[in-house]
């Protein structure tokens, strides 16, 4: 029945006059052919539901043929899907490859650096950092910082480092760690901290940079192929010169955002293991961010900016830590800070 309004044609053709086969460019269609008024007509069926409907009404003799065609249609479609997936996979792999290879190469090179070389590089950097600095060698501050460091580092499993802390008398609010386990704390940071937990928070973060070998990663990343080749080929002589060069490099080093995020998270976990209240770290950075930067140089903020995103992330990480009962330190924080003030006003010998 022809329906001119809807341009739709309904016809009844007996199955005996139909020929069925798989067709189309990808053999993913059921091709139905028949003769009508001396003309040959062809119908291409792609929709699996329509093919199923034809199979449903086909006489038993034709069912096998329709099944055969349907299977061929399915195979063609599956093949096309696989080809598409493979193409997509290749694209993703290429993208990932370009993005990953350099980082993977850096990590691999760093893994080849023996701890002894790492210590030598760290020592060179430490010497450079301590040039013309007044070092505190004894007293309540040194004892307190040693206790905090010992408390944190005693909870590191299988550490290849022996951490050594140096306290430098300077109003600069800063602390940093160097490869091999050398930690430097400025008295400005100790005076700015309201509790030893705040200092411990910073030290936990810095110690994590050492444990994860972030400094070495940055060096290899910055100095590139030459340093890599020298390290891989184990040119000891080249390395001594390199270590001196790296010393300067390391002091002005900026870690990547990924490394900072990792140091934040793993540092908090270290505090948790050592039973030190992790809220100190968050409180300290938040207060520094709000404080008047003109009173003293807060270098810690220039290397570790306290963005709203970091504050939110840190708080979420603290909340995700297992609950534990924090254990206080053996010293009085007021006494430690007071010792710094009194030695400030006393005439230097
Ligand atoms: Zn850091």
Image: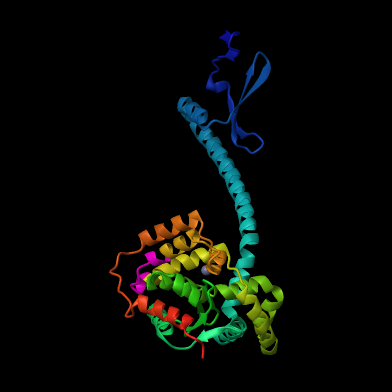
Q: Residue at x 51, y 61 (%)?
A: 292
Q: Nearer the viewer, residue 229 or 23?
A: 229
Q: Residue at x 64, y 56 (%)?
A: 95
Left or right: residue 192 versus residue 107 is left
* Quadrant of the rendered image containing residue 37: top right
Q: Nearer the viewer, residue 337 or 74?
A: 337
User: Which corner quadrant holds the N terminus?
Assistant: top right
Left or right: residue 198 versus residue 123 is left
The image position of residue 342, as x and y in percent, is 43, 81
The image position of residue 22, as x and y in percent, is 60, 34
Give the magenta part as a residue range.
Answer: 272-281
* Quadrant of the rendered image containing residue 115: bottom right
Q: Residue furthest left?
A: 325
Q: Is residue 52 above or below residue 253?
A: above
Q: Residue furthest bottom?
A: 349
Q: Residue at x 40, y 57 (%)?
A: 316
Q: Nearer the viewer, residue 157 or 348?
A: 348
Left or right: residue 205 versus residue 247 is left
Q: Is residue 156 visible?
A: no
Q: Is residue 276 magenta?
A: yes
Q: Nearer the viewer, residue 203 or 267?
A: 203
Q: Is residue 56 magenta?
A: no
Q: How is the image coloured?
A: rainbow
The image position of residue 171, as x and y in percent, is 53, 74
Q: Is residue 337 visible?
A: yes
The image position of residue 326, as x and y in percent, is 30, 70
């Amino acid at each position: 029945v022809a329906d001119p309004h809807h341009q739709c044609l309904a016809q009844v053709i007996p199955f005996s006059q139909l020929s069925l086969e798989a067709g189309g460019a990808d053999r993913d269609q059921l091709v139905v052919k028949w003769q009508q008024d001396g003309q040959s007509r062809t119908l291409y069926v792609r929709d699996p539901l329509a093919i199923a409907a034809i199979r449903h009404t086909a006489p038993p003799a034709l069912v096998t043929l329709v099944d055969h065609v349907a299977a061929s249609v399915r195979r063609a479609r599956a093949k096309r899907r696989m080809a598409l997936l493979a193409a997509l996979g290749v694209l993703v792999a290429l993208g990932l490859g370009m993005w990953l290879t350099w980082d993977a190469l850096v990590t691999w090179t760093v893994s080849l650096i023996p701890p002894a070389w790492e210590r030598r590089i760290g020592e060179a950097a430490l010497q450079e950092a301590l040039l013309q600095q007044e070092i505190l060698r004894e007293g309540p501050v040194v004892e307190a910082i040693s206790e905090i460091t010992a408390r944190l580092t005693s909870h590191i499993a299988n550490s290849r480092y022996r951490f050594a802390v140096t306290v430098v008398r300077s109003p600069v609010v800063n602390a940093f760690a160097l490869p091999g386990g050398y930690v430097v704390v400025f008295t400005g940071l100790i005076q700015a901290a309201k509790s030893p937990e705040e200092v411990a928070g910073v030290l936990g973060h810095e110690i994590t940079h050492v444990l994860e070998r972030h400094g070495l990663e940055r060096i290899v990343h910055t100095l590139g192929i030459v340093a890599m080749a020298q390290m891989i080929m184990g040119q000891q002589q080249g390395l001594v010169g390199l270590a001196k060069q790296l010393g300067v490099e390391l002091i002005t080093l900026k870690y990547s955002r990924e490394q900072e995020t990792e140091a934040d998270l793993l540092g908090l976990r270290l505090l948790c293991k050592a039973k030190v209240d992790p809220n100190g770290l968050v409180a300290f950075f938040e207060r520094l961010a709000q404080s008047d930067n003109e009173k003293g140089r807060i270098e810690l903020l220039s290397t570790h900016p306290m963005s709203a995103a970091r504050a939110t992330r840190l708080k979420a990480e603290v909340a995700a830590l297992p609950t534990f009962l924090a254990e206080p330190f053996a010293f009085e924080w007021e006494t430690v800070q007071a010792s710094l003030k009194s030695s400030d006003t006393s005439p230097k010998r």
